[in-house]
Image (cartoon, helix red, strand yellow):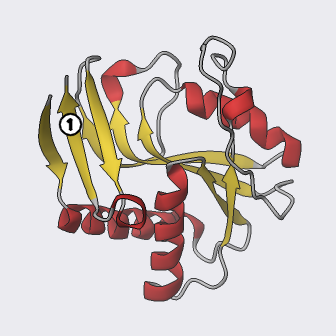
Amino acid sequence: MSHKVLLTAKEVTIILHRLACQLIEKHLDFSDTILVGIQPRGVFLAERLKEILENEYQTPEIQLGYLDITFFRDDFRRTDKPLEANKTKINFIVENKKVIFIDDVLFTGRSIRSALTAIQSFGRPSEIELLVLIDRRFSRNLPIQPDYRGRQVDAINNEKVKVSWKENEGEDGVYLITS
């Protein structure tokens, strides 16, 4: 198995600030905008963006939620191993709000399709956007594209893109793993 560094910690930090600036350009004060991290790995990215927006760009009180899509996936009954659900934490109504789904890697698009179904339990958003750190553009099964992307990666199907967060793995970085 080989590892190739796609993004260093410094490059991840630069991309996070660029994504935060793009969000500010589109949403300004975030009064009608909600960030929703898709469990499990989108939560780290969502929390980091919220922190940057509030602390470094003085954007006041951004609403952040976590959405578990485990039982909304179209493949959740197709595996022999039991699935472990994460927690959904959305303490607000999304009715008529702009929702930004946040995930670390956009691969086939199936997770986002599941998130579109799951969010309906919390109301009908006026608009939904997608922000991803890594866009694997050649692997889509569904016609889903990000509105905001950190980096586009051309990886073939036997390659895996692994995002590490210092909150979880002790360091920031993005790696291409070939088995």
Q: Position of residue 171 (x, y in %)?
A: 28, 64
Question: Is 133 left, or right, of 146 in this rendering?
Answer: left
Q: Please provide percent x and percent y for residue 5.
A: 14, 47
Nearest to the observer: residue 80 or residue 126: 80
Q: Residue at x 63, y 85 (%)?
A: 60
Q: Secondary structure at mark 1?
A: strand
**Number of marks:** 1
Above or below, 76 against 70 in this view is above
Expressed as whole percent of the image width and height from the top left, the position of residue 141 reads 48, 15
Mark 1 residue crowding within 10 angstroms, few (<14) / some (14–19) / many (20+) = some
Residue at 42%, 66% in the rendered image:
167
Residue drawn at x 25%, y 35% is: 153
Which amino acid type is marked by label 1? Leu
Q: Quadrant of residue 115?
A: top right
Q: Quadrant of the N terminus?
A: top left
Above or below for 110 versus 91: above
**Residue 64 lies in quadrant:** bottom right
* Left or right: 154 as drawn, with respect to 147: left
- Asked whether the viewer can see residue 178, the reply is yes
User: Which residue is more in the foreground, 102 or 163?
Assistant: 163
Residue that label 1 marks: 176
Please state, as top left, top right, bottom left or bottom right, where the C terminus lies in the image.
top left
Residue 132 percent location from the top left of the image: 44, 47
Residue 123 in view here? no
Horizontal arrangement in the rendering, residue 70 relative to residue 104 (left or right): right
At horizontal 76% and vertical 32% (from top left) the residue drawn is 117
